Image (tube, rainbow, N blue to C red):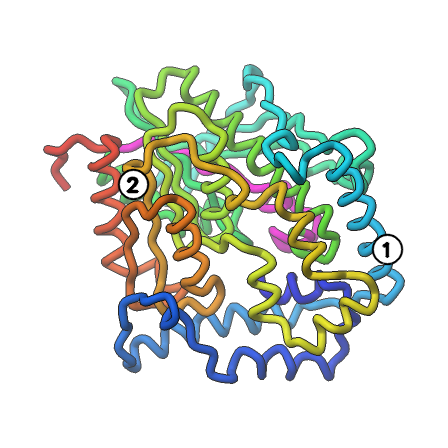
Amino acid sequence: MIQRIARGVGIALRSGAAPLLVGARLAGRRTGGAIGLPHAPWSLALASKMALDEIFFATELASVAVVPLREGRRIAEEMSAGLELFESRGWLADPRRYHPKPPELTRVRIRAGRFPGLAYRHLRFRSEYEPHPDEPGRARWLGYEPNRTAHAWLLQHRGRPRPWLVCIPGYRMGAPIVDFTGFHARWLHRRLGMNVAIPVMPLHGPRRLGWRGGDGYFAGDFVDTVHAQAQALWDVRRLVGWLQDEGAPAVGIYGVSLGGYTAALVASFADDLDCAIAGIPATDFVRLVRSHVPKVLLRGAEMVGLSIDRLERLLSVVSPFSFRPRLARRRRYLYAGLRDRLAPPEHAHELWKHWEEPRIGWYPGSHVSFLWEPAVKTFLLEAFRESKLLPDDHEL
């Protein structure tokens, strides 16, 4: 994920740039100490967890493409036009106005799907999201035809209505095998007895444009990044509303990584949510650029007009820090890894502060290791019980 952001600064990454990126990460960067987080004792197991984050980083690095200088200039010009429009429409002063309320979801298509050990339903509907008239990149975004159809995987129990948990995937997710594994869908659905809905994020899974889900999300067209995040919010709001209209007694949202970012946005717009959980959240795209991209590349970006400060202003209309959540503080939850190398713990800490310091869980692991951390399951179970998605007497 980070390399896509590095590519997005519009620099022509040649073979000599790769060692700079790797070296910046291996230079002994420490996280968490300045904000007083719990200490994670060093061990071989912890080092192995951190190595998994680095392996993911390396696989992304291998796919970084060269961005010609003229493309960097075109991106900078598009950013400038976007900022001028956002300023004139008042969206920078009041980002909530940038996001119109989506129409109710009334027409859906559902077919049966099959995953080993889980029978699910594949929900499809027309997203109907469109960038505002005159927005830079509007025609390009609407030309991404596969992305105009929204998808979700549904795991629903028969019989009496049950609470729904909407699980919002992270970057590179979007296929049943990845989503069901990443969210421990069997545990949520069968063991805990909840209904589960997993929406597919823009440009992922069956909505992808490249050969991998997520290609294009952080490809350098930062106006596209704004549209992708705005559409993610739009689509999830429609899905949540549809579940409520279908008779759901309760609806909670739970996102991981980039999905934690999206969950924080949804919590600021969707009505009547019973809980919002942000897991290992990557909440600040600009912080990722500043912390992971070497300064020499950032200086090169400035030379073609790609100012990080201007990027921050552009992304403010889709930043969770621009909004306050609608649900009560006691219904907000966060967890994160103390040695996360992809979305460092500062991300979760800043969201925790913005969310008025609700309950937060820290585990001694990395970004990828959340998949098997016992503390994560314990934290989730307690959050579900406190928010009444599970009854107090539920037997595991």
**Contact (CB < 8 A) between labels 1 and 2?**
no
Q: Residue at x 67, y 49 (%)?
A: 313
Q: Quadrant of residue 250?
A: top left
Viewer-nearest residue: 180 or 329:
329
Viewer-nearest residue: 34 or 297:
34
Q: Secondary structure at mark 1?
A: helix
In the image, taking residue 326 as reference, residue 285 lies left or right, namely right
Query: Residue 33: x, y in percent?
Result: 36, 72
Q: Quadrant of residue 298?
A: bottom right
In the image, taking residue 286 as reference, residue 51 lies left or right, namely left
Q: Quadrant of residue 295?
A: bottom right
| Residue 120 can be seen in this image | no
Type of the residue with mark 2: Leu
Residue count near mark 2 (Cα–Cα under 10 Å), binned few <14, some 14–19, many ≥20:
some
In the image, taking residue 191 as reference, residue 259 lies left or right, namely right
Query: Is 100 within the magenta?
Result: no
The residue pinned by badge 2 equals: 188
Q: Which residues are magenta?
A: 194-216
Q: Give residue 26's mark.
A: none
Q: Give residue 74's mark.
A: 1
Q: Farthest residue in the front direction?
A: 93
Compared with residue 26, is residue 254 higher up or lower down, i.e. above or below? Answer: above
Viewer-nearest residue: 177 or 150:
150
* Viewer-side label of 1, 2: 1
Q: CA distance from mark 1 to mark 2?
A: 46 Å
